[in-house]
Image (cartoon, helix red, strand yellow):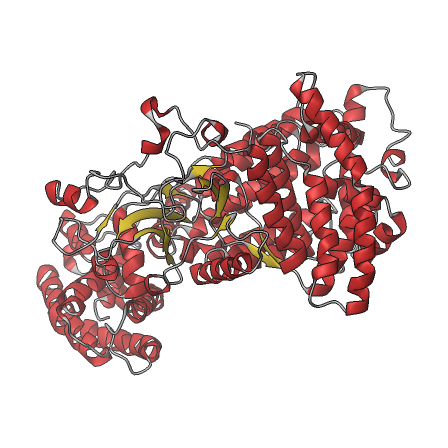
């Protein structure tokens, strides 16, 4: 703590900028700029790592004798100013007392090195107090600037131009100091937020000025979209972290954005850069108070009796990266480690998101700001790995209790004893990603009555496979490719596959997410292909493995029943029920909302969607394009309607439905998704345990009638299958998307490629 006063002397260089001073003075001042990080790291190495149990008085004594007094005496000797030594010591005592009062209570009677969390909290408090004290005590040390060693001369009288130049230098210097402090203590949160606000203001002004039939500062509205899409895409990727997660969420709904945005946001699904191992290990130390070797019982040098771990991540996403490890007891695990900067950036990023959303909702008169707190809460929970572990275990319990999904869906086991808020350890899964269609369908050559590695008792490795423990012992320091590749089941030249039916795979997926929506009310809202593995069971059937359980929503029973009745009404053209339900949700335009839910035009209502666009001018192409996009904004306002009534889970339910629809389309539309989803909605109203018996009996009769009505959906589905077989057209999802493109074009929305294409 006492070293703080030395940092204050660094500020003495500020009044000397306009004066002449010797190189010796500059060297002295530069030597005093030791960062508080260095002091804290030295304390952790010399005290905590030696097993000591220091309290605040021990810390105070150590910093005074080991760092503060020697540094002060050396400084006074260098500048030949012994009269200042007593003042410096008094100042150091005052500063130490301030930080002691602020940081001491955080220990709650424990020693500083009690655990990683306590040590980290004390260190953070010390570092922040360090900076605050530097600013508060600056005037005390300014007299040192007049010492003979620095040989100051009176500053010249500047002309007007030189004064502005000096102010520019001061501003640049101040900006540099803020940047360094932000980078050192706040993981660049201030810089990222400033970048967000400046670009957000630029984009808002660009649209305010140029969103008109003949833009004054652009060749067309499309040109305005293109340059702003590039700006936003660059911002999200440059900021990374939670910004990248928000960008991926936008990308999943990019079909409703202009084509220029669709193209730019498709880049959001590229792998995020991974952090260095030292950053990952630091997160483990801060959460567990021990190194990765101690927590997981592994050795990076092949020590006998220890496990092994890859220090290079196997996968890296926006907020975390995954490392493979084999524990000493033989268990193989996936260790998901949150990127260290996320914890510090989270609050700033969410605050910036809220402010920008509020400005845009007012600027463009679209009532969506009321939904932002709910979205922010969900995004925040996604960075809490204890919450993710709870979701995974809850979903595993629900799947195990549902006979129609048991054996078809698998949730990896979480190892709680090796998990924390920022580290989650789960069972390692071998499988094929959903996007690898060829590997799913190619002929199986892995053997009779055997499954993919690790599935339903199938051994992970064939005989004579090199053991990872031996590989590390032979190659100490190996950081990657320790895990066996396990592609023996693919046969020679890796030409074999799982030999599975895409229809079975997709049926299982739609069954799973329909059960989540209508039966359980716990919905996984990020089911993109990267979060779904496909395995082959020994019986030759597919098993879906669902990972990444951070983003879930909970549907209250009343809303869940409403949503089930809403889906039944959609598929039976029950317009009175449909209108009653959506008006209760604050939606003003039933047709548009119904079409958005089905992801195809809803033709059972009063056709208000089509009529709302009649009479638009067709005299000029530019005017037409502008009017269509104005109409699109109006349509969004009508869907959001009364945002105080709008059920918040609908935001993520729409995301889930869109991703599942895109998965089905990507695999060639092997199943009638709408029929399966509608059947689960109707069946849930019969099976739900929280409905009265009389209502369940009545719903049973309606369910039987509903199955008959769905026959027409089957007729259309098989018509598209025959057409697809004869190569006369696409599948059912392709037909639905073509219809949506036609309707959307009238609404000013240009739907382009499938969300996962490319």
Relative placement, left or right, of 273 versus 406 is: left
- Name which residue lies at 27% across and 54% down: 281
Q: Position of residue 573 (x, y in %)?
A: 86, 44
Decide if residue 510 is in sight here: yes
Q: From the image, which quarter does the N terminus lie in?
A: bottom left
In the image, farthest residue toward the front: 448
Q: From the viewer's perspective, is residue 416 above or below residue 53?
A: above
- Report the number of discs: 0
Q: Residue 390: image x %, image y %? A: 48, 63
User: Which sits in the foreground, 485 or 346?
Assistant: 485
Residue 508 drawn above or below residue 227 = below
Rendered location of residue 694, percent (x, y) = 81, 68
In this picture, is 403 found above or below 97? Answer: above
Q: Is residue 35 visible?
A: no
Point 16% across, 55% down: residue: 28
- Please name the residue shown 79% across and 20% down the image: 621
Q: Quadrant of residue 273?
A: top left
Location of residue 139 in the rendering, given as x and y in whole percent from the top left corner:
32, 67
Residues 743 and 499: in front is: 499
Left or right, 428 with reference to 707: left
Residue 734 or 192: which is nearer the viewer? 734
Residue 535 or residue 98, whichever sits in front: 535
Q: In the figure, 454 relative to 257: above or below?
A: below
């Amino acid at each position: 703590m006492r070293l703080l006063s030395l940092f204050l002397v660094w500020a003495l260089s500020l009044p000397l900028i306009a004066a002449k001073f010797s190189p010796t003075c500059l060297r002295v001042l530069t030597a005093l700029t030791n960062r508080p990080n260095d002091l804290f790291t030295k304390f952790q190495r010399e005290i905590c790592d030696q097993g000591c149990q220091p309290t605040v008085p021990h810390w105070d004594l150590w910093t005074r004798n080991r760092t503060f007094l020697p540094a002060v005496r050396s400084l006074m000797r260098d500048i030949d100013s012994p009269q200042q030594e007593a003042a410096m010591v008094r100042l150091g005592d005052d500063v130490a007392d301030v930080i002691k009062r602020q940081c001491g209570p955080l220990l709650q009677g424990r020693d500083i090195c009690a655990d990683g969390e306590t040590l980290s909290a004390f260190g953070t408090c010390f570092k922040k107090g360090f900076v605050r004290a530097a600013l508060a005590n600056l005037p005390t040390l300014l007299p040192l600037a007049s010492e003979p060693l620095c040989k100051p001369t009176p500053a010249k009288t500047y002309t007007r131009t030189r004064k502005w130049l000096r102010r520019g230098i001061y501003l640049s210097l101040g900006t540099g100091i803020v940047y360094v402090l932000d980078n050192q203590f706040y993981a660049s949160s201030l810089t990222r937020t400033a970048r967000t606000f400046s670009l957000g203001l630029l984009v808002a002004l660009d649209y305010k000025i140029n969103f008109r039939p003949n833009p004054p500062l652009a060749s067309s509205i499309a040109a305005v979209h293109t340059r702003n899409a590039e700006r936003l895409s660059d911002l999200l990727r440059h900021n990374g972290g939670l910004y990248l997660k928000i960008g991926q969420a936008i990308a999943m709904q990019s079909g409703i954005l202009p084509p220029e945005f669709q193209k730019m946001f498709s880049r959001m699904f590229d792998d995020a850069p991974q952090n260095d191992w030292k950053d990952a290990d630091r997160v483990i130390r801060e959460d567990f108070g021990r190194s990765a070797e101690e927590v997981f019982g592994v050795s990076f040098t092949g020590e006998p009796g220890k496990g092994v771990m890859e220090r290079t991540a196997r996968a890296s996403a926006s907020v975390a990266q995954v490392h493979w490890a084999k524990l000493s007891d033989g268990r193989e695990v996936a260790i998901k480690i949150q990127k260290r900067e996320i914890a510090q950036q989270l609050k700033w990023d969410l605050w910036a998101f809220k402010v920008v959303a509020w400005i845009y909702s007012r600027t463009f008169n679209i009532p969506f700001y009321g939904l932002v707190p709910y979205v922010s809460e969900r995004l925040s929970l996604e960075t809490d790995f204890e919450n993710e572990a709870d979701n995974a275990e809850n979903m595993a319990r629900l799947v195990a209790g549902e006979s129609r999904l048991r054996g078809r869906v698998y949730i990896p086991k979480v190892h709680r004893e090796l998990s924390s808020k920022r580290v989650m350890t789960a069972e390692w899964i071998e499988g094929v990603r959903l996007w690898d269609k060829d590997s799913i369908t190619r002929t199986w050559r892995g053997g009779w009555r055997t499954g993919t590695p690790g599935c339903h008792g199938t051994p992970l490795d064939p005989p004579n496979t090199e053991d990872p423990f031996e590989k590390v012992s032979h190659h100490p320091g190996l950081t990657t490719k320790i895990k066996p590749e396990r592609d023996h089941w693919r046969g020679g030249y890796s030409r074999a596959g799982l030999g599975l039916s895409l229809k079975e795979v997709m049926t299982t997926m739609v069954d799973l997410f329909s059960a989540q929506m209508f039966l359980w009310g716990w919905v996984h809202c990020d089911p993109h292909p990267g979060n779904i593995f496909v395995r082959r069971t020994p019986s030759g059937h597919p098993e879906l493995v669902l990972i990444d359980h951070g983003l879930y929503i909970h549907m209250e029973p009343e809303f869940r029943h409403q949503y089930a009745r809403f889906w039944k009404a959609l598929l039976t053209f029950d317009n009175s029920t449909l209108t009653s339900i959506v008006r209760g949700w604050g939606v003003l335009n039933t047709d548009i909302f119904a079409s958005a839910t089905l992801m195809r035009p809803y033709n059972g209502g009063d056709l208000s969607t089509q009529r709302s666009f009649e009479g638009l001018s067709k005299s000029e192409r530019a005017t037409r394009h502008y009017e269509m996009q104005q109409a699109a904004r109006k349509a969004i306002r009508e869907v959001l309607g009364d945002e105080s009534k709008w059920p918040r889970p609908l935001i993520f339910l729409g995301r889930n439905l869109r991703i599942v629809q895109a998965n089905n389309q990507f695999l060639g539309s092997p199943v009638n998704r709408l029929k399966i989803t509608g059947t689960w909605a109707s069946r849930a109203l019969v099976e739900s345990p929280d409905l009265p018996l009389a209502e369940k009996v009545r719903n049973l009769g309606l369910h039987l009638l509903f199955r008959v009505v769905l026959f027409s959906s089957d007729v259309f589905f098989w018509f598209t299958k025959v057409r697809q077989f004869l190569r006369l057209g696409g599948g059912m999802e392709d037909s639905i998307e073509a219809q949506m493109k036609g309707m959307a074009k009238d609404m000013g929305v240009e739907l382009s490629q499938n969300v996962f294409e490319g």
